[in-house]
Amino acid sequence: MKISDIVPMTLEEVNKLERFDMVELPRKAKWFLRPVSWLLAFPEVWECHTKVRKHGMKGLKGGYLLLCNHNSFLDFKVATKAIFPRSANYVVAIDGFINRENLLRNVGCICKRKFISDIGIVKQIRYSVTKNHYICALYPEARYSLVGTTAILPDSLGKMVKLFKFPVATLICHGDHLRQPVWNLHKRKVRTSADMTFLFSPEDIDKLSVDEINAKIREAFYYDDYKYQVDNNIIIDYKDRAKGLHKMLYICPNCGSEHDMHSDGNKLWCDHCHKTYEMDTLGRLKATEGKTEFEHIPDWFEWERVQVHKEIESGKYREEMEVDIDSLPNSTGFYRLGKGTLLHDETGFHLRAIIDGTEFKAEKNPLENYGVHVEYDYFGKGDGFSFSYPNDTYYLFPTNKRYNVTKIHFAVEELYKIKSKAL
């Protein structure tokens, strides 16, 4: 089945499907597949002239944790170069396994459903480092960064590092978002780089608290691809360089209208007040007339977060919409259950539907999701978002195509922060 296929199935039929094996221990990469992985990775790394700078990595042998940032599929290829000629077990989201489960298992991948607690993953990571003696590569942001800046990192990351007491390194890529932003997957000509840094020894971990470990990881994970572009004078003259940017920048800073922003070519504009911005070849924004509220794209993006936070604190946040519901029980693909109603408010997600005469509901309270996975024009199905349970992941696509799912992204993160502080 192609990922783009819409395959109707009843709830009863989906419930009978075999579930993905989430507890299988990670395999060592098959020897004959290792050259294949290098062959698939190195051409694009060479095309991007990717330079990997290593800091304190000399002498680090055996198994360890490698924490990587995540902007595009290029990240995996850069990691292949950074650890060459060694192999790694990579933690990969379940949708990456669709139609290629056997291949990914045989190159050493570990499957994970996003943004849920998973005790099994602890055992799998431990096995990777202590039994396979591999590098275990994790992408703790758990999705592509939306604007080339650090995404939210879970507090459980520090707890995991403290539990394992394995050596820890980070791999932070720069320019991968510029090469292929999640809001426009056309590849641009960009020179990229990466910093691979030794972060903790087991002795360091013993001396640090969980909070101190998390603080050091977050400090190491700082990156800003648009600042990197300006600082390194990276010219991107692709004519459609702003096309799709309205999916991130969905609130007009001039009139405050939501879901009325559009983009094409090198322009971004509001259909409500008609204010227009141009994106220059260094990734900066400038209003064609009047004040430029935000020249730096991440500044606009974070301003939107503040607006959503204010809406939640005022008690006014409530998003209700009709959605198409896809189930992802295993690696065979998505199954369309039908349409339903999704309510998201300060009490979390509430999904309701009648599927072939059977009532279906799924709920998630705010403390169950510190983040949410969003997709843009996902294989022709439109923009959507998903949340998971141990045995299934539900992909939800609003039938109102003007609705911008980035607001859900902000709301989930801000609700989690607010509710966590209230404990």
Image (cartoon, rainbow, N blue to C red):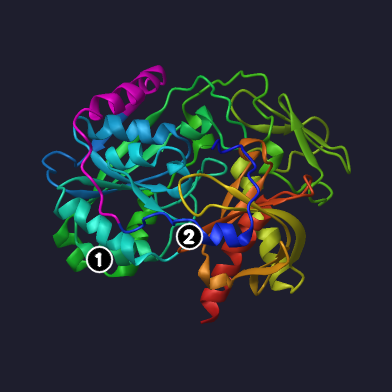
Pick whichever of labels 1 and 2 is earlier in the sequence.
2
On screen, residue 405 versus residue 298, left or right, reads right
In the picture shown, does residue 255 fall above or below 188?
below
Magenta-drawn segment: 24-51
Q: What is the distance, in whole Å, between disc 1 and disc 2 at their CAs?
A: 20 Å
Query: Which label is found at residue 383?
Result: none
Q: Quadrant of residue 312?
A: bottom right
Identified at 51% across, 60% down, the residue is 16
On screen, residue 319 versus residue 6, left or right, reads right
Number of callouts in the render?
2
Q: Residue furthest right?
A: 273
Q: Nearer the viewer, residue 83 or 305?
A: 83
On screen, residue 187 versus residue 353, left or right, reads left
Amino acid beneath label 1? Lys
Q: Quadrant of residue 1?
A: top right
Query: What secondary structure is found at the residue carrying circle 1?
Result: helix
Identified at 18% across, 60% down, the residue is 204
Q: Position of residue 63 (x, y in %)?
A: 16, 48
In the picture of the structure, the residue carrying the numbered disc 1 is: 162
Identified at 55% across, 20% down, the residue is 235
Q: Quadrant of residue 10?
A: bottom right
Magenta includes 330? no
Q: Nearer the viewer, residue 406 or 221?
A: 406
In the picture shown, does residue 414 fall above or below 182?
below
Amino acid beneath label 2? Phe
Q: Position of residue 418 (x, y in %)?
A: 58, 72
Answer yes or no: do the residues labelled 1 and 2 have beta carbons within 8 Å? Answer: no
In the picture of the structure, the residue carrying the numbered disc 2 is: 115
Q: Position of residue 338 (x, y in %)?
A: 70, 55
The answer to whether residue 348 of the structure is visible from this angle is: yes
Magenta includes 39? yes
